[in-house]
Amino acid sequence: MHPSAIENAFALFLRVVAAYCLLFGILYWVRLIGLYDGSLWRFDLMPIHWQVAAVTLSVFFPFAAIGLWMLSSWGPVIWFICAVTEIVMYAGFPELFGSRPLIIVSHIVVALIYAAFRIVLHLKRRRAAH
């Protein structure tokens, strides 16, 4: 049985999110290894809260990208951990991490689109079972 158009769209959506996760992971690695000359863009110069966040997200974002690209069930879970981490960083502690409303909004939009896809796919499977 061939995947439906909605299943193909969902797979494409997950792979687009995977590409963004890989990009975010690379950006955190750039920060960790000091390729960028900005302030606090080198691990040994970062305050401890940035060190913990950068190390965690530099590992989790690439794992999320792999899981999302392979359409594995654990990919969205790892992405969710990354998204919640960044939302807490930028919305909960702006005095430590700065304010990044675009990142917060983008994570919420991705979560809403993901939920919409899951609901539509669930309803489709439920109708097919009857």
Image: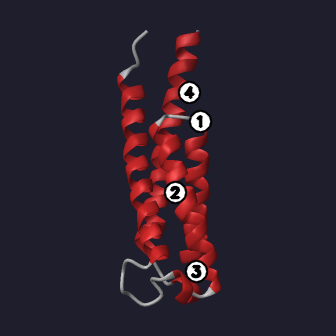
Kind of residue at badge 3: Trp
Q: Rounded to the nearest whole Å, what is the CA distance between mark 1 and mark 3?
A: 29 Å
Name the N-terminal-most of marks 1 and 3: 3
Question: In the image, which is nearer the foreground, mark 4 or mark 2?
Answer: 2
Q: Position of residue 11 (x, y in %)?
A: 41, 33
Q: Rounded to the nearest whole Å, what is the CA distance between mark 4 and mark 3?
A: 39 Å
Q: Rounded to the nearest whole Å, what is the CA distance between mark 4 and mark 2?
A: 27 Å
- Identify the residue position indicated by label 2 in the image: 61
Residue at position x 45%, y 65% from top? 105
Q: Is residue 24 above or below residue 32?
A: above
Name the N-terminal-most of marks 1 and 2: 2
Kind of residue at badge 1: Ser
- Identify the residue position indicated by label 4 in the image: 122
Q: Position of residue 37 (x, y in %)?
A: 36, 86
**Residue neighbourhood size for the residue with mark 4, other residues' Cα within 10 Å, grouped as few (<14), some (14–19), many (≥20):** few
- Judged from the image, the secondary structure of the residue bearing numbered disc 4 is helix
Query: Which of the image's four quarters has the C terminus?
Result: top right
Q: Nearer the viewer, residue 3 or 70?
A: 70
Name the N-terminal-most of marks 4 and 2: 2
- Identify the residue position indicated by label 3 in the image: 50
- Identify the residue position indicated by label 1 in the image: 73
